[in-house]
Image: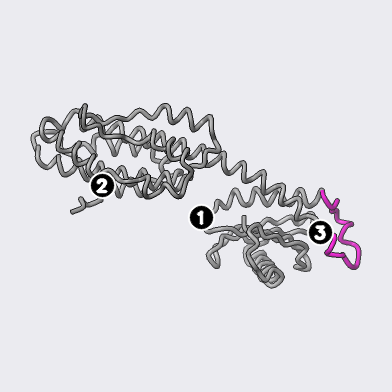
Amino acid sequence: MKHVWIVKKDSSTMLFYYSYNNTPFKAILVSGLLSAMNSFSEIEIQKRGIQSIDMYDLRWVYLNDPKHNLLLIGADDRDSNANVMQARLAVINSMFIEHYNITSEFWDYSAIDLDIFLDFGAVLEELSIEWQIADKSMDLAKILDLLRIFQNIILILCDYIKNNIKGANYRRLLFDLHQNSPHLKERYGNYVNHKAFEVLELFLPKIDMVIEQIVFHPSDGQNILQSNPKIGLEYSMVKEIFYIIFRQFVNSIKEVSKKQPEQVSWYNFLNAQIMPFFLRQWDYLLNLGILKELIQIFFTIQSEE
């Protein structure tokens, strides 16, 4: 999360504000607006209140704790998971209550010195470190899942090439893949460390024109990545590279397949092999955020001139 507010619910008094990225924010004004929106929604939605809204390019998540007279609000990018944000607000709420021993009697004092809450920032800094470690572990798990999907699809494509593209057409396909192989190192080499890109290259198919084969053995890369979770691969970058490779394979295969109508057509292959794979993995692909792009690449992409 980028921002966290802790508000005294009955008076809408901002008790504490914290910015994880030091972005300038008129915290008190925003706190008043967010509290007012929640109060209005509780009246209109029979005390359920707001749970999550998207506003100002941010996702805002609320956590109500009427027992301790607290309202917590977190803000992060729009693509952030609201359930994760709410779970983290619940942790912050529990630690805030414990740290200051907040009970119903705590608010009985006529005036609360808000400065007593300033040291809670140190608690959130420690939480931030723990969550960063957890996020990296989640990213690694997603990358490993993405690599598995990539490997399965590439193997399906290689099987189609092996069984359906022969002779001169096969050599023409290999030559086309070799000639148009994307220069990924030049494009992405500056964005990741050298070791991370070396590991990623182990997962990419290579065209060996000497033995006239597509070489693809990513198992060593999987082992290296699992034993070095901090190697520095970014999920978004890995996904983008895989899209580039899929487009290259799909366009090249479609072009060569036009020259041999007597074999299993590319579109029949899509219906017999690719679509059943997508259907089996539908929820998985959806959770990884790659389903739409894969369908576009395999079923709607046009060959580049």
Mark 3 or mark 1: whose residue is earlier in sequence: 1
Q: Quadrant of residue 64?
A: bottom right
Q: Quadrant of residue 73?
A: bottom right
Mark 1 or mark 2: whose residue is earlier in sequence: 1
Answer yes or no: do the residues labelled 3 and 2 have beta carbons within 8 Å? no
Let me know if residue 267 appears in the view: no
Which numbered dot is residue 79? 1
Let me know if residue 232 appears in the view: yes
Q: Amino acid at mark 3?
A: Phe
Residue at horizontal 41 percent and vertical 45 percent from the top: 239
The residue pinned by badge 2 equals 299
User: Local crowd at mark 2 within 10 Å, few (<14), some, or many (≥20)?
Assistant: some
User: Local crowd at mark 1 within 10 Å, few (<14), some, or many (≥20)?
Assistant: few
Q: Amino acid at mark 1?
A: Asp
In this view, the residue in front, 289 or 304, is: 304
| Residue 269 image point, x, y percent | 21, 36
- Element marked by disc 3: helix
Q: Is residue 54 above or below residue 180?
A: below
